[in-house]
Amino acid sequence: MALAQPLSTALDELATAISQVEAAAGASAASQKGNDQVVELEAALAALRKEHMSLKSVSGDIAGRLEGAIVLIEAILSGRS
C-alpha cells in the first residue's frame, strides 16, 4: 500500500535513531555512572522506546483498517457488495 510506505520508512528511521542513541548512551553511561544527566537521558530513551512500540502498533492497526476499506470499496465498485 503506497500510503503505508512513508510511515513504515519513518518507523524504521526512528528505530535506527533509537539504536544509535542506545549505543551512545551505553558508552556515556559507562564513563559517567551515577551522573544525574545520564539517568535523565536513560529515562528519555526508555520513553522513546515505548513511544516507538506504540507507534508501530497504531500504524499496524491503521494499515489493516485501510486495507479493509480498500477491499470493501473494490467490492462495491465491482458490484459484489
Image: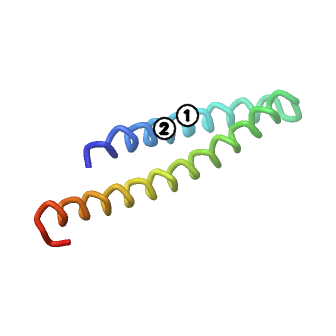
User: As displayed, is residue 79 above or below residue 19?
Assistant: below
Q: Is residue 73 left or right of residue 58?
A: left
Residue 29: give x, y in percent of width and height.
76, 34
3D distance between C-alphas at marks 2 and 1: 6 Å
Judged from the image, the secondary structure of the residue bearing numbered disc 1 is helix
Report if the CB atoms under discs 2 and 1 are less than 8 Å apart.
yes
Q: At which x and y percent is residue 37? A: 82, 27
Give the residue pinned by disc 2.
16
Q: Tell me where residue 43 appears, x and y as whole percent.
A: 77, 40
> Which quadrant holds residue 68?
bottom left
The kind of residue on which mark 1 rests is Gln
Q: Relative to the observer, which residue lies in front, 34 or 2?
A: 2
Across and down, in percent, residue 48 comes to: 64, 40
Kindly identify the residue that appears in the image at 82 percent across and 36 percent down: 39
Label 2 sits on a secondary structure element that is helix
* Relative to 62, 37 lies left or right: right
Q: Residue at x 38, y 60 (%)?
A: 64
Dot 1, crowdedness within 10 Å: few (<14), some or many (≥20)? Answer: few
Q: Residue at x 48, y 38 (%)?
A: 16
- Mark on residue 53? none
Residue type at numbered disc 2:
Thr
Residue bearing mark 1: 20
- Residue located 34% across and 55% down the image: 66
